[in-house]
Image (cartoon, rainbow, N blue to C red):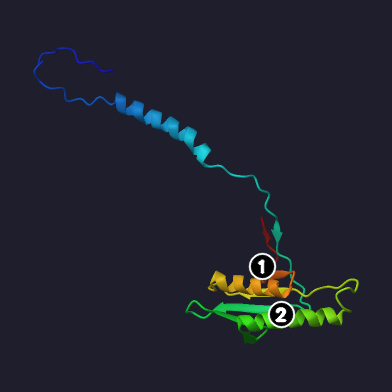
Amino acid sequence: MAISVGGDSADKPMSDINTTPLVDVMLVLLIIFLIAVPVVLQTIKVKLPDVKFDPTTTKPENVSLSITGDGNGGCKIYWNTTQVTSAELLDRAVAKLKLEIARQGGPNAPGVELPEAHIRGDVNTPYKCVGGAIFQMQQAGFAKVGFISEPPPGGNVERL
C-alpha cells in the first residue's frame, strides 16, 4: 500500500492514484477466467471418419437426381432431365425399385443389388429441398442415397 508522509504541504490533496487495488482485482479476474474457461469448453472425443475423393462408378440402374431452388423458396427436382414433383418422385422411385428387384429375380434372389440414388444439389439450394428428396427416396426404399460433388481441379483430394 502506498502511504503519504507529511511533507511541506499537508493541506494539499494527494493527486496520485493508488493502482494496487485495481491490479489485485484484475489478477483475481484473470485467475477466475483461467479456471472457468476449461469448464465451459467441454467436448466429447469423437473420431470422425477420414474422407477421400473416390470417383463414382455410374451404373445404369442408379437414379440421378438434380435439385435446385426456384428462387422463391421452392424446389425443383429433376429425375435425370425430367422435372418431377415430390409425389411423382416417390412414385417413380417405388416403381424403379420394384422393376430392378423383379429384373434381378425377385426379393429373395441371392445377390440382389439395389440401385443407388445420386443427388446433385446446387450450391444455392435450400436445405429443405435436398432433405425432402432424401426423405422421399428413403421412403421409397432406397438404402443408399449419396451426394455427387465436383472435385477441385488437380486430381484426387484427401479431406481429413
Left/right placement of residue 126 relative to residue 159 reads: left
| Identity of the residue drawn at 90% across and 74% down | 109
- Label 2 SS: helix
How many marks overall?
Answer: 2
Up-down: is 79 above or below 154?
below
**Which residue is depicted at the point 49% across and 38% down?**
37
Determine whether label 1 and label 2 are within 8 Å by CB: no
Q: CA distance from mark 1 to mark 2?
A: 35 Å
In the picture provided, is 5 more to the left or to the right than 70?
left
Secondary structure of the residue carrying tag 1 is: loop
Percent coordinates x, y for residue 3 in the rendering: 23, 15
Judge by depth and name the residue closer to the eye, 130 or 99: 99
Residue 122 placement (x, y as % from top left): 58, 75
Q: Quadrant of residue 33?
A: top left
Q: In the orientation shown, which residue stands out farthest toward the bottom?
A: 82
Q: Residue at the location (52% across, 78% down)? A: 74
Identified by mark 2, the residue type is: Ala
Residue 129 in view: yes
Task: Say left or right for 98 vs 25.
Answer: right
Q: Is residue 85 above or below residue 41?
A: below
Query: Relative to the observer, which residue lies in front, 40 or 96?
Result: 96
**Residue on which the image places disc 2:** 93
Task: Give the image location of residue 147, x and y in percent.
Answer: 67, 70
Identify the mark at residue 154; answer none if there is no mark: 1
| Residue in view at x 83 percent, y 78 percent | 101
Q: Residues within 10 Å of mark 2 (few under 14, many from 20)?
A: many
24 on left or right of 73: left
Whichever of callouts 1 and 2 sits on the residue coming sooner in the sequence is: 2
Query: Which percent across, then down, holds residue 133?
Result: 63, 74
Q: Quadrant of the C terminus?
A: bottom right
19 vs 67: above or below: above
Asked whether the viewer can see residue 60, the reply is no
